[in-house]
Amino acid sequence: MLTYLARRVMIAIPTLILISIFVFALQKMLPGDPVLALAGDDRDPETLARLRELYHLNDPIWMQYLQWVKNALQGDLGRSIRTGLPVSDMIAQKLPVTIQLAVMSMIFAAAIGIPAGIISAVKKGTITDYAANVIALSGLSIPNFWLGIMLILLVSVKWRLLPASGYVPLSEDPVQSIRTMLMPAFVLGTALAASLMRHTRSAMLGVLRQDYVRTARAKGLAERRVIMHHAFRNALTPVVTLMALLFGELIAGAVLTEQIFTIPGFGKMVVDAVFNRDYAVVQAVVLVTALGFILMNLLADLAYVALNPRLRTG
């Protein structure tokens, strides 16, 4: 297991380096000058020169990149050009909000998608199977922004059950924090539930055809025990792997939902940074997001090995 983990880490390191180079280069190719945006109406040449010197924008690109990497390895991700705040502090403030949203979304996705996939596989070829597939396709087809707006109109405006927008930190008021996150988490969770349902169904169909399942049934075991203990336990491996990857996507892809529900999370921060040409924030956000994806891929690989004992000997 340790050898496998070390091998995966060695693969992840050059991947992260390539991503950092790619992101840094793309930022420099964007049109416009962040110093002009920062200076506003004051376009005094001395002010512009001082700002460029302050943010090392006069240095060659390769020197700017090496300086950025050096500082990042020391935990210094730079300062926001717009606010002057340390980017690491901004990320530490915004990232937990998006993580909370991602965790709640995964709970919704697992609670809906996994049982639906099991039932669809067991009831293959029946009306239940067709209905589950239609619901799954609907979850994949309905845009998140449309579903979010419809939920706001119905649940918040018409029924007045949940707040339409905003965010309350979990440490201040856990109940109100969960209430503000329920609708956006459901919006994100439905799309993920559709993917989980399809993968769970496919995995279960493959397992249900195996000899050991037929043997378990021939021994007279209860159908529920055959399905949950023998079939689902072995079909769980690709499902857990997919959940780890989907969680990484949630961290990076909750931008639109956070905008609709006015959640001050990771996605909203990067959108504001792109519009303001805040290079330090954009670079740090993409770097942290890439690191999150790599970690989730690593966890997915480890979960695959942990759930499949046959791979441990390999």
Image: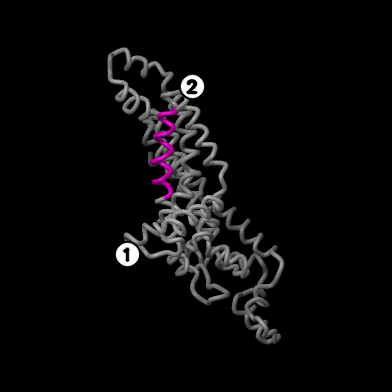
Q: Quadrant of the C terminus?
A: top left
Which percent across, then down, holds residue 42?
A: 67, 85
Question: Mark 2 — residue?
Answer: 125
Which percent across, then down, holds residue 267?
A: 52, 60
Q: Secondary structure at mark 1?
A: loop
Q: Closest to the observer: 222 or 249?
A: 222
**Residue, x 59% and y 69% (percent of image)?**
278
255 up-or-down from 35: above or below: above
Type of amino acid under label 2: Gly
Separation of residues labelled 2 and 1 (CA atoms): 47 Å
Mark 2 and mark 1 residues within 8 Å of each other at the beta carbon? no
Type of amino acid under label 1: Asp
Res. 155 visible in picture: yes
83 up-or-down from 128: above or below: below
Which percent across, then down, holds residue 227?
A: 35, 25
Which percent across, then down, holds residue 81?
A: 58, 74
**Residue, x 32% and y 67% (percent of image)?**
172
Q: Is residue 114 magenta?
A: yes
Question: Looking at the rendering, which quadrant does residue 29 occupy?
Answer: bottom right
Q: Quadrant of the N terminus?
A: top left
Question: Mark 1 — residue?
Answer: 173
124 up-or-down from 85: above or below: above
Question: Looking at the rendering, which quadrant does residue 162 occupy?
Answer: bottom left
Q: Secondary structure at mark 2?
A: loop
Give the class, few, some or many, for how many residues have Cα within 10 Å of label 1's Cα (few <14, many ≥20): few
**Residue, x 38% and y 31% (percent of image)?**
308
- What's drawn in magenta, residue-wise? 105-120
* Extreme residue in the front direction: 158
